[in-house]
Image: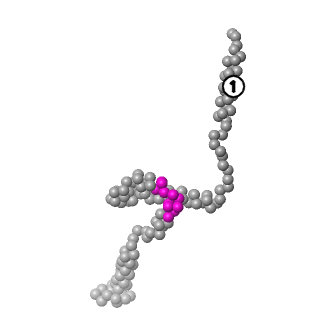
Amino acid sequence: MSRQPGFFKAIALTIAATMFLTSMPLGLARAGLVSTERLVEARAAASERERLAAILLRGDVGRQMVALGVDRDEAMARLASLSDREVREIAGKLDQLPAGQSVIAGVLIIAGAVLLGLVLLDLLGVTDVFTFINPIT
């Protein structure tokens, strides 16, 4: 068994060079301070983006999107491509919209409740607003 010192030396140099090259950094690392405002804005934008995505995934919104001919996947892709400022703007507009009903429906509900209250008071004999209602004795 003759040893070939040149062969082992070449393998050792190849392994050493490989280890040296793999331990080198490939890019420049940049360190800096991150302001609290920037961190809060980034987290708020991510939270708003998740909230908008959850709204798009709701069943009633999905049915309305289908009725309007909008593809849900395309809407999600467009939401993902919006900037943080645009996401905050849309979320702000959603927060300002009325939840559920119009003003007319609210007025009708209140008027119905008042009418029902007056009828009950007439039935109990407390008031006499409606002459066609006879009080319970």
Q: Position of residue 25 (x, y in %)?
A: 66, 40
Q: Residue at x 37, y 88 (%)?
A: 127
Whether residue 47 is visible: no
- Which quadrant would the N terminus be assigned to in this image? top right
Q: Residue at x 65, y 30 (%)?
A: 18
Q: In the rendered structure, does residue 58 fall within the stretch colored magenta?
A: no
In the displayed structure image, the side of residue 16 where residue 78 appears, left or right: left
Seen in the image, is 50 located left or right of residue 136? right
Way the structure is coloured: one colour
Task: Give the tally of numbered discs.
Answer: 1
Residue 116 image position (x, y, % from top left):
36, 80
Point 67% across, 27% down: residue:
15
SS at mark 1 in the image = helix
Q: Which residues lie in the magenta part?
A: 79-89
Q: Can residue 36 be seen in this snapshot?
A: yes
- Determine whether 20 is above or below 134 in the image: above
Residue at mark 1: 13
